[in-house]
Image: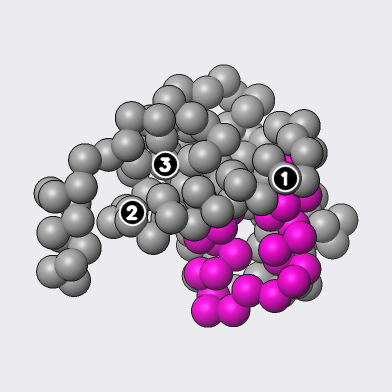
Amino acid sequence: MFDAIGRLFAAPQSSHLRDDPKLAVAALLVHLAQVDGTVDDVEKQAVRGALQDFYGMDEEAVRELIREARRSDADAVDFYRFTSVLKQLDDKARLEIIRMMWQVVFADGKNHELEDNMVWRIAELIGVSARDRTTLRKQMARSGK
């Protein structure tokens, strides 16, 4: 706990993170994939696929983005550094971020309560309504993606 508090005051936030929604989304997806304590190959693929599809990136660019996202996530003390940049995006982009999150949640066919809670918190922080979040959850649960 003290280490996290120390990092909050000692480490300046990277300015490129605040300006890079791709890195913020990737960090949230990486965190989400591991929030239940296990990350299997299907979840890793869901993260890669979501980023590739949404941003039109090639495999190498996505691998580098995920490496950077893991470092950013490890340094983060909360979600604010990620959600503050995403809150500025338009409604369509913010809805897509929540859709990607549900895609990762349901990739392994399970919905752990910690995953559900994280998506709820991120949706609230970036201004996606409970109705839209729930609709996207149902769509992704049915599609099995």
Evaluate if marks 3 and 2 touch, with contact meaning CB atoms under 8 Å apart.
yes
The kind of residue tagged 3 is Phe
Mark 1: which secondary structure?
helix
Q: Which residues, given as a range, are shown in magenta?
A: 29-52
The percent position of residue 134, horizontal first and vertical second, equals 64, 49
Q: Who's the residue at 41% across and 50% down the image?
A: 72
Which of the two discs, 1 and 2, sits closer to the camera? 1
Residue hosting label 3? 82
Residue hosting label 2? 76
Residue hosting label 1? 60
Which of the two discs, 3 and 1, sits closer to the camera? 1
Magenta: main secondary structure equals helix
Q: On the picture, is 139 further left or further right than 87? A: right
The percent position of residue 92, horizontal first and vertical second, equals 65, 25
Tell me, yes or no, if residue 134 can be seen here: no
Circle nearer the N terminus (3, 1): 1
